Image: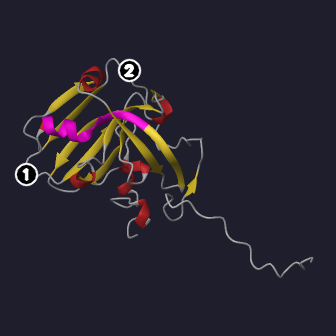
């Protein structure tokens, strides 16, 4: 028996991937390049990362030094405040926990400021970069991180919007107070949790 159009009910909406936070879409295999500053040009042979501020043992590492400490791989999702998400992607680098174990944060340290070679800065509570939540990474999907995406080395804090994962990272400073970075001064949220849609100050 033929069924007249209209008797079959409303079409079911395509099921939304539960890995997508509210307001986000899956960008698939592409990876948009978004940056507020000129693309950094960093010589991997001369690049160093420093952890300083409220630590007992301020330390700097070359890329070779970091790789000698061992490697970790993150596999999961990343989310940009501009509403794209990239699902099930991978990065290789080293857990920030390993570096902080060497630098030894002082008891009064509660916040960090990430700083890039371009002078870009962003702030985070210390709790958001410890306990297996943040990495210093130099590979994406098994290949060296491209300059456009922060190569040779960038920060990775995947549980927060991606402006908190500073490209061309060069320094992590521990503080006893919050110190807003570039986007936070310009009206963005201080923390940036995509599941809470913390895009702008007051969200």
Quadrant location of the N terminus? bottom right
SS for callout 1: loop
Task: Judge left or right: residue 120 versus residue 35.
Answer: left
The answer to whether one can see residue 25 in this image is yes
Tell me, for residue 43, which label it has, or none. Answer: 2
Residue lying at 76% horizontally and 80% vertically, measured from the top left: 9
Q: Is 130 within the magenta? A: no
Q: Pick out the residue farthest to the bottom.
A: 7
Q: Position of residue 75 (x, y in %)?
A: 42, 42
Q: In x, y percent, where is residue 7?
A: 83, 82
Which of the two discs, 2 and 1, labels the residue nearer the N terminus?
A: 2
- Where 203 falls versus 139 (above or below)? below
Compared to 18, does 10 lie above or below?
below
Could you say which disc has been placed on residue 190 in the image? none
Of residue 164 and residue 100, the one placed in the foreground of this image is 100
Residue 101 is situated, as x and y percent measured from the top left of the image, at 15, 39
- Start-end of magenta stretch: 91-102
Residue 50 located left or right of residue 73: left
Q: Nearer the viewer, mark 2 or mark 1?
A: 1
**To which residue does mark 1 refer?**
107
The chosen color scheme is secondary structure
Q: Please, what secondary structure does the residue beneath circle 2 have? A: loop
Residue situated in front as seen by the camera: 119 or 163: 163
Q: Is residue 72 left or right of residue 19?
A: left
């Amino acid at each position: 028996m033929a069924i007249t159009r209209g008797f079959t009910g409303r079409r079911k909406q395509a099921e939304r991937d539960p890995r997508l936070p509210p307001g986000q879409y899956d960008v698939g295999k592409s990876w948009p390049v978004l940056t507020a500053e000129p693309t950094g040009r960093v010589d991997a042979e001369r690049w160093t990362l420093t952890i300083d501020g409220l630590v007992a043992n301020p330390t700097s590492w070359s890329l070779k030094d970091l790789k000698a400490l061992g490697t970790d791989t993150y596999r999961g999702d990343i989310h940009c405040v501009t509403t794209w998400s990239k699902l099930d992607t991978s990065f290789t680098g080293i857990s920030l926990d390993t570096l902080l174990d060497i630098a030894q944060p002082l008891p009064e340290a509660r916040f960090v400021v990430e700083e890039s070679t371009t002078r870009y800065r962003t702030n985070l509570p210390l709790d958001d970069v410890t306990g297996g939540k943040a990495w210093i990474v130099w590979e994406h999907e098994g290949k060296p991180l491209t300059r456009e995406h922060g190569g040779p080395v960038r920060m990775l804090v995947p549980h927060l919007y991606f402006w908190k994962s500073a490209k061309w990272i060069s320094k992590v400073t521990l503080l006893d107070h919050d110190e807003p970075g570039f986007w936070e001064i310009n009206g963005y949220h201080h923390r940036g949790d995509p599941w809470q849609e913390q895009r702008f100050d007051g969200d």
